[in-house]
Image (spheres, helix red, strand yellow):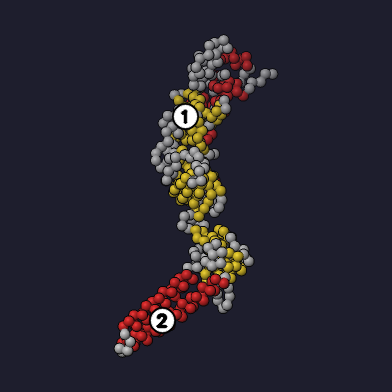
Amino acid sequence: MIFLSATRCVSAVLVLGTGAACAAPAAYAASRPAASSQAGALPLPATAPASAPVAQAAPLSIPLSTQQASALGVGYGAVQPVSALPVGVTARVVPAYGTQSVVAAAYPGVASKILVTLGARVRAGEPLVRFESAEYFEAQRALAEAGSQASVAADALRRDTALYDEGIIPAARLRAAEARAREARAAASARASALASAGIRAAQGGGAPVMVAPAGGTVVAIAAVAGQRFAAGEVLVRIAQSDRMELEAAVPAPAPAFRIGDKARVPAYGAHGMVLGMAPSMDGTGVLRLRIGLDTAGTLQMGAQVPVQVEAGGAAGPVPAAWRVPARAVFQWRNKPAVFVARKGAVMLLPVTRLAGDDDSVVVQGAFQQGERVVTAGVAALKGALLGGE
């Protein structure tokens, strides 16, 4: 018994029509010359004899009628020109600009207790860190002293005003009392402002003071532990509004021509947005830093590293000779990407250059024309037909 390979079976269907069945190799070979003269027959690409001179290769194509396409299960997909070139980058999810706040130590001291945990949601004014600080208590003492001096100066001014009205003291003495009262009030106000801006809630009933949240949000970082000494200005807690996030990416050189307004999306997380700004790195590496705002955050989590597709150049106009095709249409032909494109009752093998893509679609460069279609189903059968004709 003689068996015919799958490749020869597909070739026979294309040559003999939809009603042909696989036969023995000898019978198939005998049918080829006659088949070329039948109406509707599709001759395979012929192979020149070994002794024939080598000519320049013509584009590989297969005549294909509607009936034959249906028999082989051939399906088509649209070729669409793209308005931008998708570029894959890796980005980190960060708080949106202006939504992050820090709790920094206004005075040196020692953290006695951390009152929140990482990821906790806090309200403005909520206690975060209890601490001990000699400098803070000294600032409180100085405020009390400045307040007392302001009160004494105000009393002296009232007394001198009454004496001046009775004609007992000269105007110069009254002006001096007014100046001392202004200076005392200013000193007390400065002391009070310094304590108020420190973000500290004063001790109640002899207890330790606490640092409080300057704004509501989610605790995204805690740099202090109980018993740790800290210096003035040291950041102890970071708070961000977790519902407002952005993406920050570092694109190595040579970077594509990104523009503000280029669309970006994170397909794996259902997020999308656009480029808000960019700046070159100043460390000599040539890295371009991108900041991407999110219109929809999807399932992104703060701090995560995610793959992002940015449509470079989309804000300025179309990219020449770039096309989006279904991912199923692209296959390997002699170790290079190619597609089958439908043209004038036939399908033609068209080499392409893959630029970017995902599981659904691929952006390629190739000699397409507006409105053309590519084969998305039955690709293996057509490849077998070409291989059978070689």
Decide which of 32, 190 is in the foreground and name it: 190
Up the image or down, 221 lies above or below 87; here it is: below
Task: Measuring from the top left, give residue 290's x and y in whole percent.
Answer: 48, 46
Task: Kindly indicate the quadrant of the structure image that contains residue 14.
Answer: top right
Residue displayed at 46% across by 34% down: 323
Residue displayed at 44% across by 75% down: 188
> Is residue 251 visible in this depiction of the protein?
no
Decide which of 266, 47 is in the foreground and name it: 266
Residue displayed at 53% across by 74% down: 138
Up the image or down, 86 lies above or below 207; here it is: above
Task: Measuring from the top left, give residue 4's x and y in whole percent.
Answer: 64, 21
Task: Tell me which numbered mark, 2 or 1, is placed earlier along the sequence.
Answer: 2
Task: Kindly indicate the quadrant of the structure image that contains residue 72.
Answer: top right
Amino acid type at image mark 1: Gly
The N terminus sits in image quarter:
top right
Residue displayed at 57% across by 14% down: 31
Secondary structure of the residue carrying numbered label 1: loop
Which numbered circle lies on residue 205? none
Q: Is residue 256 left or right of residue 134?
A: left
Q: Residue furthest right?
A: 1
Which numbered circle lies on residue 153? 2
Up the image or down, 357 lies above or below 1; here it is: below
Rate crowding at label 1 as few (under 14), some (14 to 19) or many (20 or more) other CA atoms within 10 Å.
Answer: some
Rate crowding at label 2 as few (under 14), some (14 to 19) or many (20 or more) other CA atoms within 10 Å.
Answer: many
Count of picture labels: 2
Task: Measuring from the top left, give residue 101's x and y in whole percent.
Answer: 50, 60
Residue wearing tag 1? 366
